[in-house]
Image: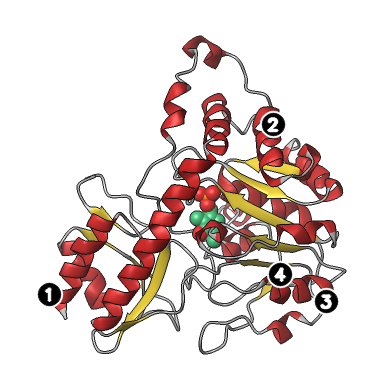
């Protein structure tokens, strides 16, 4: 066999949720926000001629808007093409030792992909039976720690004190807290970045800001770690954020009223939905996200998933150990969730 075959980097890529071509389905499989972004973004019908110019490589205006929103210095903010980009850059920048990094066995399924891609050794301590992180698992030598809070796909949020203990107990490692879903009811650990120099918090515009199609994510930390991230980014691809994304992102940040209103609606719908499906024999851990992780007492999850799909309702199903009898159901509009409840009723 040709020797070059051995030189190809071999990776098993991340599998995203299905994006059906037909937009007429009830799509509850990728945690998108049903309400769409603030209508203020419509005012940014940009001068098309400006697109001939490269964007600002530092995306400074967006960085400044995010910094002001969170009350931090712009030098503490790093933006990227979705938080996937921010997380990939963070893995490359911060997880650079020979010791294994740690993340839970049940978590965002991109982490092991990046670790494999960048050849970072890793260990995945098992969540407890009720899908909680056991902090004792994070008190051993490691090359870094990462987990989402709330965790995905369980929706469970740990307290600030809980996260703080892990950050405090690991002064020699960088701890990344992926707050993709924090706006849906959890308490952010952002204030801890002033207290600990080993903490990085990542966020995304994809879920709570309903802008998955734009690709905006960011990290907040101290200036030293943000500079390290920027140094890696500028060694790879400088112009990652395109002009429309920078402008539209700023408009979204400005419309805080709309942001809070839609989040409130999603939280209310979630609570109502959980209530209804519990009556049908489903259970799910208490969710602080825009999805619930549900299992039924008698009908296998895979069966519900297949039947729902036939009825044009899309859930997410993970054929993985320990979670293969669960469905991750994104929270859509009230109308979508009513149809979903009707369907589940008819099935049960
Ligand atoms: C959706 C998600 C992301 C990535 O979001 P982007 O669209 O790339 O910003 C990161 N982490 C978790 C846990 C997610 O669920």
Neighbourhood count class around disc 1 (C-alpha, 10 Å): few under 14, some 14–19, many 20 upward = few
Closer-to-camera residue (171/71): 71
Give the number of the disc on residue 193. Answer: none
Number of marks drawn? 4
Q: Secondary structure at mark 1?
A: helix
Residue at image coords 47%, 69%: 153
- Mark 1 or mark 3, which has the lower sequence index? 3
Q: Name which residue lies at 52% across and 65% down.
A: 109
Foreground label between 4 and 3: 3
> Which numbered marker is on residue 121?
4
For marks 3 and 2, the one nearer the N-term is 3
Q: Is mark 4 within 8 Å of ligand 1?
A: no
**Cα distance, mark 4 to mark 3?**
21 Å
Q: Disc 3 on helix, strand or loop? A: helix
- Please tell me which of labels 4 and 2 falls first in the chain: 4
Asked if disc 3 is less than 8 Å from ligand 1, the answer is no
The reply to whether the C-beta atoms of the residues labelled 4 and 2 are less than 8 Å apart is no
The residue that appears at 62% across and 80% down in the rendered structure is: 133
What residue is pinned by disc 3?
Answer: 169
In the rendered structure, find residue 238 and report the number of the disc placed on it.
2
Q: On the picture, is 72 further left or further right than 273?
A: right
> Would you place residue 69 above or below residue 48 in this image?
below
Which of 262/104 is in front? Answer: 262
Report, in whole angstroms, how far the alpha carbon at label 2 lies from the one at label 1.
53 Å
First in sequence: mark 2 vs mark 1: 2
Q: Which mark is residue 346?
A: 1
């Amino acid at each position: 066999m040709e020797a070059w075959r051995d030189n190809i980097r071999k990776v098993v890529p991340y599998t995203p949720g299905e994006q059906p071509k037909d937009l007429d389905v009830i799509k509850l499989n990728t945690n998108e926000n049903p309400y769409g972004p603030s209508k203020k973004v419509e005012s940014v019908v940009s001068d098309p001629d400006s697109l001939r110019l490269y964007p600002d490589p530092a995306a400074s205006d967006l960085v400044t808007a995010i910094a002001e929103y969170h009350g931090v210095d712009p030098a503490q903010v790093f933006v990227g093409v979705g938080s996937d980009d921010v997380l990939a850059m963070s893995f490359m920048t911060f997880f650079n030792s020979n010791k294994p990094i740690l993340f839970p066995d049940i978590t965002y399924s991109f982490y092991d992909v990046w670790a494999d891609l960048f050849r970072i050794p890793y260990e995945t301590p098992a969540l407890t039976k009720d899908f909680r992180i056991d902090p004792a698992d994070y008190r051993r030598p490691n090359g870094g720690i990462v987990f989402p809070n709330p965790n995905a796909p369980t929706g469970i949020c740990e307290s600030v004190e809980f996260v703080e203990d892990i950050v405090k107990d690991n002064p020699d490692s960088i701890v990344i807290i992926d707050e993709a879903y924090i706006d849906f009811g959890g308490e952010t650990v952002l204030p801890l970045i002033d207290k600990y120099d080993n903490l990085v918090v990542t966020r995304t515009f994809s879920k709570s800001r309903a802008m998955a199609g734009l690709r905006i994510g960011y990290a907040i930390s101290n200036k030293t770690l943000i500079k390290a991230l920027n140094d890696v980014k500028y060694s790879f691809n400088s112009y990652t954020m395109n002009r429309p994304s920078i402008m539209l992102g700023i408009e979204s940040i400005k419309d805080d009223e709309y942001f809070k209103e839609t989040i409130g609606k999603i939280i209310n719908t979630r609570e109502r939905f959980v209530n209804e499906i519990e009556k049908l024999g489903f259970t799910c851990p208490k969710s602080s996200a825009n999805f619930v992780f549900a299992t039924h007492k008698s009908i296998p999850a895979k069966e519900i998933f297949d039947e729902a799909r036939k009825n044009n309702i899309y859930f997410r199903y993970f054929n993985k150990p320990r979670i293969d009898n669960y469905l991750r159901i994104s929270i859509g509009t009230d109308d979508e969730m009513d149809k979903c409840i009707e369907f589940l009723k008819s099935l049960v």
